[in-house]
Each structure stands twice: as structure tokens, then as C-alpha cells.
Image: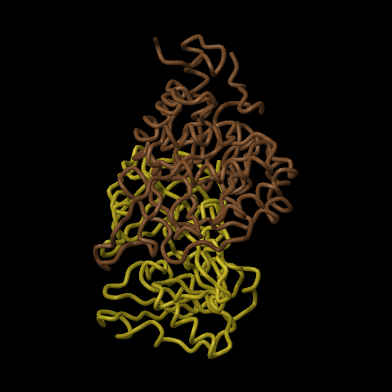
Chain colours: A brown, B yellow
Amino acid sequence: MTLETKLLGVTLKNPVLMASGTFGFGEEYAGYLDVSRLGGICSKGLTLHPREGNYGPRMWETPAGMLNSVGLQNPGVEHFIRHELPGMRGLGPAIIANLGGGTIEEYVEGARLLNSAGIDILELNISCPNVKEGGANFGLKPAIATQVVSAVRKVFSGPMLVKLSPGAENIVEMAKACRQAGADGLSLINTLLGMAIDVEQRKPVFRNIAAGLSGPAVRPVALRMVYDVVRAVDCPVVGLGGIATWRDAVEFLLAGAAAVQVGTAVFQNPEAPLEIIDGLQRYMERHGFEHISDIRLKK
Amino acid sequence: MPSEMVTVRSNQEVGEDVFEMRLPSSVPAKPGQFYMLRREGSALLLPRAISLCNQEEDTLTFLYKVVGEGTAELSNMKPGDKLRLTGPLGNGWPLEELSGKRVLLVGGGIGIAPLLLAAKALRQQGNPADCCLGFPHQPFYQEAFQPDCGALSIATESGVAGHKGLVTQLFDPADYEIVLCCGPTPMMKAVVALCKAAGTPVWVSLENRMACGVGACLVCTCSDHQGKNRRTCKDGPIFRGEEINFDA
């Protein structure tokens, strides 16, 4: 029995990855859990140029979830390659660099730099506001997403995941379009858009009004989308959205995910990812599964 | 273990909506650091960031005010109940900069909590700090400060105890070489302005809503005067007062 598995040709110790934006560049958490046991780490969302992110409140807790409005604060791709990536490499898990952008040119230039940087996998975040199109998310319409993915595909030769937004007009059509445009695999879902109002101040909590909802609240939505996408495309799918326990992870694997990402759960319990790995192992032993890919729904 | 399940030793109300919780821990913390606390099986998603107030042998004491659902849940915990304790986190007071100096501690309301361990550390150095504590109404916990301070002064806005008015009316920063401050943002802003005018360095302990507590998620950032983000949890919670833009 082994938890070891392959994702887009990359060997992972296990199928549990840390989701982008929740785990920094890995070293932040190094004192709080044995980071080397993780299957992989998705970097904080990178952009070509450094970004300070959004002003004002950035987080609000909601029932079984949280809203965040960090605004892609990050040191920029070049700084990442020079300063964060070497430390991340030393941790052991596979390195997945998450890349966003405000224009197609920014995506392409960022991907070009990452192409020779020595990352294991590129995860393309297409849920970013398109600066030239009035800030509409690149990940809503297949035609726009196709432009980003195919442009990046031309300059990035390594394994590439495209991370889908649950705000897509039709998640299955979006998945097919991204696959056709050159994605080697898909990861879903990114955060759902929500908002909160401070009733004492009588104002929206966030300056941008809308913010990204994550945590167990989004899990059934994520699971349904993963289930549908797995059945519509011929590439590996990485499932994420509110996974907090081994049972949640198994649900996504049963739905057909090749691997899972854990995000918000690490805030409530830094050891949650390791507890998920251990629980997954016990589940496989109990059911006599040899490989992660044996975890499949009953016919 | 920096993140572990621990058992509540005691949890009692010591002022209006102010509680004192004692927890076991074997890891030594620095004065000014904080922990993340979350009740086992809580229906709430996130732990709450609470400053360490006191540390004696294997016991940590947290002083906290009930301001929302998270702190209300903590206040309902009984001895024997379990919670996940992650920490110590953050940088702590710059004790090495305080040695031999005339130090003033300024606390407002529940912001007095992280100052107690600084007072104890300074007394142990043979250099007890003067201490000014301000409260809206009934003071709490001032008796814990008494044995560890030089001069202790109290201000209450309602006038029920000590000076009637604001804590900022109790001291002249020119009398001190360094000031440590924690309290509501308007109070810290006023103390920093007074210290700046007097040329006295001041350090403040900031608070913000946090998720990870370790510097990874970037939801608790504050802003410096250059517009650069500082992570309250990891770069702080203690900052030089002059650096922070309280109006950002």
C-alpha cells in the first residue's frame, strides 16, 4: 500500500497539497507541522510584478467559512524565484507555483520566467480581474480563459494545472475549453464570491465589497463541480474547497480527483494536513486499496 | 509542541466582560507574544488570537474581553474543557532595548494584558517600570500590576477610580526613555503622538483579525508610513509606534 502517486508526471509522496494563499511559501509553517510530509505546496499567488494587495479589512469569518480580500499581495515572480523558491525547495514537497495576472501579457511574462525556474508544476490562476476588460474575471467565459491558457502554453513547457473559478458560467464547458487550450490538468474550485456587511458601522466589510469565500461552507459546491468536471475531461483533476478532514479528502478522491488541496483548514488546526494524510492511509488499509487511484466510487 | 490540545485549568470573570483563563504549557514564551486559541469541536472556523498576560512555571494566563462570538465561546469554557493552543507566536517586546532605561508602560482596557509580563521582566532586571492604566469604567487586574511596577497610576473615563479622564493625561513621555503601549487604536495613536513630540521612542502592541497567526495568509496586515504592509502576526504584534500608519 502506498500513498505515493503521480500528478502530471510529477511524483508526490501523497496526494495532499497545500492550497495557494493559505500556506505562504511553506517556510512560515515549518515550525508548526512537519512540512516535509506534505505531497506538495502551492505557492502564494504570484504576479509578474510585486503587489501590496488590498487596503482595509482583509478577512471576515462566516458560518463554516471565511471571506478574504487579500488582493494577491505577493513579492512578484522574480523575487519568488530568487528568494522564496530556494527555501521552498529545501522543504521536500513538490513545488507548485501559482501564477495570476492582470493582463495576458503579464501572465505570459510571468510564465516565461517560471519556465526555467525549476518548479515542479505551474498552477494558473485564471480567477484574476482582467484589467483591460473592466476587471471582469478571466475565468468566467471560456473564450477569455482560452486566450490566457493558450498564450501561457506557448511559453511554459512544464506540467500545467489551470485553477478554475466556481463563478464560471458553465464549469464543465470552462474545463473543456482550458483542457483544449493546453492545460495538462485542472484544479478546482477557487473561492466563491461573497460579501459581508458590518451592521454596527452599516457599511460593507470590504472596500471591494465582494471577497472570496473558503472553508467547509463551499465544500459541497466544490465536490459537485469536481464530480462533473472529472466526467467531462480526459485529464487529472485536483479537488479543493473546504477540505478539513480525511473523510472530506476521500470524498473528492471518490469523485475522481487525482489529488486534493487543503487550505483554510490549516488555520483552524496546523496539523490538519498531516491528520488528513494519516486518515487517508488508514482508510486505504481498511479498504485494501493499494494505490490512490484505487479509490473510486462503487459501480 | 507549538500546537496542541490542552485542558483549561481555570476560567473566571475578573471584570465586566473580562475573563482570565489559565492553561498549561511547557514551551516558554516571551513577554508580548500571543497564542491562537480554539475550543475543541467549536462550530466557529477560526481560532482567536489572544495575548499572553502571564506565565508562571507551566501555567499560561490569558486575559481577554468578550467582544464577539469567539471570545464569548472562550468565556463559557469550564476547567477540564479542551482547546487547541498554538503558540507562542509573534515577536514580543524588545526587552533587550529596555535594560537600564526609564520605562513607562501605558495600557488601555483589555490592552493592559500584554504589559504585565513586561512589567515583571523589568522588575526582575531591578529596573521596575512606571505604569499608567486607563479604563472606561471599573478598573480590573490593576492589583496584578501593583507588585511589579514602580509608580502605578489609574485613569477611568467615568471617574469611578483614579484620575477622571484619559490615560494620556497621567504622564509626560519626556520623563521616560522608552514607552510600551497597548490599548484601543485611538489611544495608541494619541500616545504615539505624545511620545513623538517628546522625542521618546514608543513600542505598540497591535491587534487584528487573524487566520493563520504565522505570517502565511496575509489577512492581518497593517500599514507603515511608506505604505508597506506589515504582518501583525509575524512582523509584530509589537512595532515601533512611529512606523505604523494608524489611519491606513
Q: Nearer the viewer, residue A194 or B9?
A: A194
Determine whether, in the image, residue B210 is placed left or right of residue B44.
right
Q: Is residue A114 visible?
A: yes
Taking the spot 54% from the left edge, 56% from the top edge, the residue there is A102
The quarter of the rendered structure image containing the C terminus of chain A is top left
- In this rendering, would A167 be left or right of A35? left
Q: Position of residue B211 (x, y in %)?
A: 45, 51
Q: Nearer the viewer, residue A66 or B214?
A: A66
Quarter of the figure that contains the N terminus of chain A = top right
Give the residue furthest to the front.
Answer: A143
> With respect to residue B19, does B184 lie above or below?
below
Question: Looking at the image, which is closer to me, A77 or A56?
Answer: A77
Residue A280 percent coordinates (x, y): 50, 22
Residue A215 percent location from the top left of the image: 39, 42
In the image, B91: left or right of A90?
left
- Residue found at x 43% / y 59%: A58
Give A218 or A283, whichever is nearer the viewer.
A218
Residue B147 vertical placement versus B24 (above, below): below
- Residue A269 is at least partly visible in this image: no
Q: Quadrant of residue B65?
A: bottom left
Number of numbered markers: 0
Name which residue lies at 47% across and 34% down.
A175
| Rendered image quadrant of residue B188 | bottom left
How far from the left and from the top, in percent, is residue B100? 64, 77
Left or right, A184 with respect to B64, comes to right
